[in-house]
Image: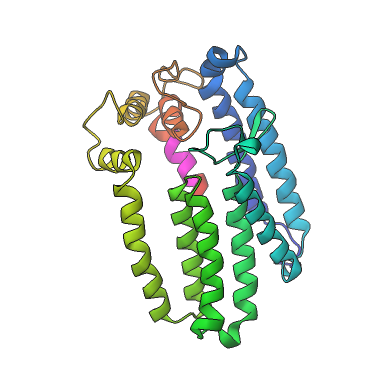
Amino acid sequence: MKENSVDLTLLAVTIVLVGIGVVMVYSSSSVISEVKYQDSSFFLKKHLFIVLLGTSVMILASLTDYSKLSGTAAISLLLLGFLLLVLVLMPKFTGQPQKVCRWIHIGRFNFQPSEFMKVALIIYMADSLARRQDRIKSFVWGFLPHLLILLMAVGLIILEPALGTAVAIMTVVTAMFFLAGIKLLHLGGLVLAAVPVIYLSISQVGYRLARLKAFLHPAENLQGINYQTYQSLVALGSGGLRGLGLGHSRQKFLFLPAPHTDFIYSIIGEEWGFIGTVAMDYRCRS
């Protein structure tokens, strides 16, 4: 394949999945949009804006030589990520109570700085680890500088609070450390130190512990914390083999809370059935 050629298969699959996403966001959110905003296409408009923005970024990224995302550019992205993580902790910029500070609101749209930081941190770490290959085995000059940057980023994200995002970032960067050749002794120490921190972050925070118990015991408290999970299973089950048909979901009529977000797959299963969901999974993996 030529250096600047386009992977047509990947592009085609991406376009198909984005198209399915647009259709299903409207199908799953039309009822709740009408109830909340008196506009059945409210969430569709938001999603189309995000699709347009994402497509623009994709085109820009495809035209950018990745080798230029190094040195000053990588550091600038990292510093911008830290700035956004600090700003999101200020209610003045988020319009949210201090207890929950994950998004910066721009009009009717929300921006989550931790998502930007994921990309910025990966770019910076890839560049820095490559540049320090001659010192990568050193704790002081190879491991410690990268560890401190990782801990600062993770610490700010935990303050939002967004433990899941913090754990995801730590997992990815730890994998990068391993691939870069950092000593297993140093990595083992990092993992061992992270385990009690994660344990305390879950066991000492009520809603996190409740979510863990709900995950371990999905058949309990069906009218409480497991309500959404239970309703999503009802949606998947009622879809059967071939589904109820596009737009004919019953669970989206306020039985399944926020059906257009994390649980949109259950609406796809209800409307498209087992065959439709398997076909979509196959496209995602192809």
From the top left corner, tell me how far across and down residue 279 is, in percent: 47, 40
Q: Nearer the viewer, residue 113 or 280?
A: 113
- Residue under the point 44% across and 27% down: 267
From the top left corner, tell me how far across and down residue 246 is, in percent: 51, 22
Q: Nearer the viewer, residue 273 or 123?
A: 123
- Residue under the point 56% across and 82% down: 141
Q: Is residue 46 above or below residue 216?
A: above
- Residue under the point 55% across and 15% down: 36
Q: Position of 206 compared to 92: left or right?
A: left
In the rendered structure, which segment of residues is drawn in magenta? 276-282
Main SS of the magenta segment? helix
From the top left corner, tell me how far across and down residue 128 is, in percent: 63, 74
Q: Is residue 78 above or below residue 280?
A: below
Q: Which colour assignment does the render follow?
A: rainbow
Query: In what quadrant of the picture does the N terminus appear?
Result: bottom right
In which quarter of the view is residue 2 placed? bottom right
- Residue under the point 47% across and 26% down: 258
Is any part of residue 286 visible from this angle? no
Q: Nearer the viewer, residue 157 or 51?
A: 157
Answer whether residue 280 is magenta in the image.
yes
